[in-house]
Amino acid sequence: MIQVKELIVTDLSRKGTGTSEISPVRTVLEVYTKDGELVATNDTLGNYSVEDLHSLAAFCLANKELSAKEVLQKWRKD
């Protein structure tokens, strides 16, 4: 399927605290429809940021009894 739509593209959002190497402040590209629906994002460090990976690692350490499949089903990004 191919669709042509008017979109709003912004890089005004920021992610990260800037307080350590784990969480640098960076630009997040966001794409919205004209009605304000978010349709895409792109974090400059990847869509799974260092914060996300840190959160996943902490979840894994706290839930060692879970299989990898269960971890992926139960872990939620903040």
Image: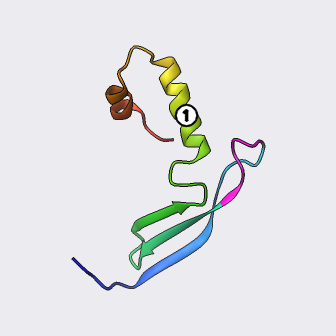
Which residue is labeled 1 in the image?
A: 55
Q: In which quarter of the image is residue 28?
A: bottom right
In x, y percent, where is residue 51?
Answer: 60, 42
Residue that lies at the very extreme toward the top in this rendered image: 65
In x, y percent, where is residue 6?
Answer: 39, 85
In x, y percent, where is residue 53?
Answer: 55, 38
2 w.r.t. 59: above or below? below
Give me the residue at 32% from left, 29% from top. 69
Q: What stretch is highlighted in magenta?
A: 20-26
58 w.r.t. 50: above or below? above
Give me the residue at 43% from left, 37% from top. 76
Q: Kindly state the secondary structure of the residue where label 1 is placed.
A: helix
60 w.r.t. 38: above or below? above
Left or right of 30 in this view: 73? left
Left or right of 3 in this view: 58? right
In x, y percent, where is residue 77?
Answer: 47, 41
Q: Is the magenta stretch mostly helix, strand or loop?
A: loop
Q: How many labels does the image show?
A: 1
Q: Quadrant of residue 15?
A: bottom right
Q: In which quarter of the image is residue 74?
A: top left
Q: Which of 4 and 68 is in front in this view?
A: 68
Give the amino acid type for the residue marked by disc 1 in the picture.
Ser
Residue that lies at the very extreme toward the right in this rendered image: 19
Q: Does the magenta stretch include residue 65?
A: no
Left or right of 6 in this view: 53? right
Give me the residue at 37% from left, 27% from top. 68
